[in-house]
Amino acid sequence: MGFSHMGFLIIPTKIMRLTTLSTENNYSHAAIRVGSGYILIKDINKHFNSTWNTELYGILVSGEYYLLKQWYDRLGEDELKGLPIKINVRFGRLIGEQHPVKIVGIGLNYQDHARDLQTTPPTKYPGCFIKTPNTLTAPGGQLILPKIAEKTTGEGELVLVFTKKSRNVPSDQWIDHVAFTASIDGTIERPFLVGSDSNPRNLTAAKIFDTSFVVGPELISTDELSTDPMDIEVSTVLNGKVWRKNQVKNMVFKPGFLVEFFTKFATFNPGDMISTGTPGAASLSHGDIISCRIKGLGDFPELYSPVIDLKIDK
């Protein structure tokens, strides 16, 4: 049964969950989730004599994403029997840092987070910043705080990953252009944004340190959703305890607005991302585990990252 939201109808089909696995030789392979495990695309190619791209970024930029989804929707469960299923996995970077993706982050997109910072969110245009590919980190990979960082925070966020070339997308068609994943966004608050040397123009410096954008672990197709995406709940979790949580419906600028707004003046290519803002930022210390938890996307695996402070870990 589908649901209607903002004038469009979503008919859930079969869920498709893609990921990148890091294998024993540290090679990265695209994989598709089946039950509680994953099947490598290369094993699917061998079994079905197909030629799908074996890298997730390649699946996106080649235009194979929707073809793979159609193939998967038609596939019977018995047809995958006999293929090797990986259960205890190590996730790789969803998209590798060698790929020229643009990552737009949204600041102060929840009223509650703005109140935490004793400020007010923008009301006409979203506050935004750019993350660069060097920041991309695999799920479970270390979020490494550079020595210059005096205070750093981690933020759980819902991410929109573009699955087709997109320009001038109407707000009621946003869901046809993206897939969902999660992120942990690291920010150096002091000295760049807090203190005597702070300046809002330092936001780029605060956001682009290596390893500061943990993304994944799965890329979720949007056409199988059985609940309203406005009901998706995003949590920042620190050391196993929920620090802040909120729902998409409470965003100041909701996904449809963000996709329409940014594609009015910029082309978004497959693999480009909009990280939609955090319900709250947790202060990070050496040895912490910072996580992002998403509810409303089925049993989406929790995204986590151990924190390493280079001032301590010498």
Image (cartoon, rainbow, N blue to C red):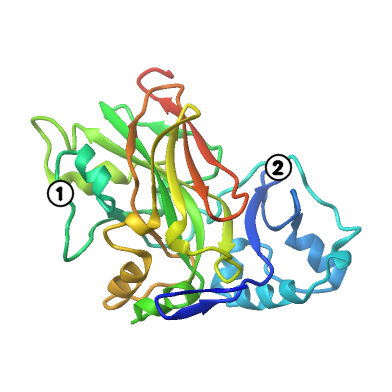
> Callout 2: helix, strand or loop?
loop
**Residue type indicated by callout 1:** Thr
- Residue toward you, 266 or 221: 221
| Residue position for label 2 | 89
Q: Is residue 252 above or below residue 214?
A: below
Residue toward you, 214 or 111: 111
Measuring from the top left, give residue 76's x and y in whole percent: 83, 70
Assess disc 1: are there few (<14), some (14-19) or many (≥20) residues with their C-alpha within 10 Å of its C-alpha: some
The quadrant holding residue 275 is bottom left
* First in residue order: circle 1 vs circle 2: 2
Amino acid under disc 2: Val
Q: Position of residue 204 (x, y in %)?
A: 24, 49
**In this rendering, is residue 302 above or below 309?**
below
Q: Identify which residue is drawn at 77% across, 44% down.
A: 87
Q: Is residue 196 visible?
A: yes
- Can you see residue 166? no
Mark drawn on residue 120: 1
Q: Quadrant of the N terminus?
A: bottom right
- Look at the numbered disc 1 and give the secondary structure of its residue: loop
At 58% from the left and 77% from the top, the residue drawn is 63
Q: Is residue 90 left or right of residue 304?
A: right
- Name the spot of residue 256 as percent of width and height, x first: 36, 70
